[in-house]
Amino acid sequence: NFREIDRIIAYIKENPHIISISEVIGNWDISCNYHIKNYQELHKIINQILRKFPDDFKKRITVTYPKIYKSNYMPKVSI
């Protein structure tokens, strides 16, 4: 429901674990990134959103990264 997208985004932004939220083009309307301690915390957040907006989500996909490694894509410069 596109009329509710602003309300959904505002609700998601209230969560202290949110890292970023984006409106996207394609199969999905929004993309959210959270920094959480465990899967239970993620499921709690998802369930809260689905309870608040029960008729506004047709489908969802969850991708988790158990560990994120720091990468540096800039080459080292020696002078």
Image (spheres, rainbow, N blue to C red):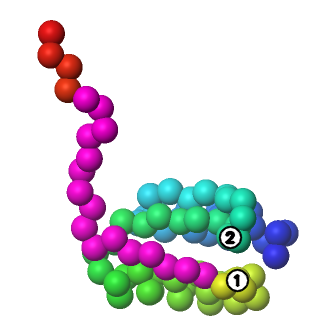
Element on which disc 2 rests:
loop
Image quarter for residue 7?
A: bottom right
Disc number placed over residue 57 in the picture, else none: 1
Q: Which amino acid, by three-letter code, is at mark 2?
A: Trp
For image coordinates 23% across by 57% down, the residue present is 69
Q: Give the range drawn in magenta.
A: 60-75
Above/below status of 38 relative to 8: below
Q: In which quarter of the image is the N terminus?
A: bottom right
Quadrant in which the C terminus is drawn: top left
Residue 13 as seen in the image, left or right of residue 34: right
The spot of residue 46 in percent (x, y) is 52, 83
Note whether residue 27 is visible: yes
Q: Going 44% across and 58% down the picture, which residue do you hit?
A: 19
Residue 56 in percent (x, y) is at 75, 82
Measure the alpha-carbon separation of dots 2 and 1: 10 Å
Residue 65 horizontal/vertical position (percent): 34, 71
Q: Is mark 1 on a helix, strand or loop?
A: loop
Q: Most extreme residue toward the left, as rendered?
A: 78
Quarter of the image where one finds residue 10: bottom right
Residue at the image point whose x is 62% and y is 69% from the top: 11
Residue 39 is covered by the magenta coloring: no
Q: How crowded is mark 1: few (under 14 residues within 10 Å), some or many (20 or more)?
A: few
Of helix, strand and loop, which mostly describes the magenta segment?
loop
Residue under pointer 2: 28
**Residue lying farthest right?**
3
- Residue found at x 49% / y 68%: 15
Q: Is residue 7 visible?
A: no
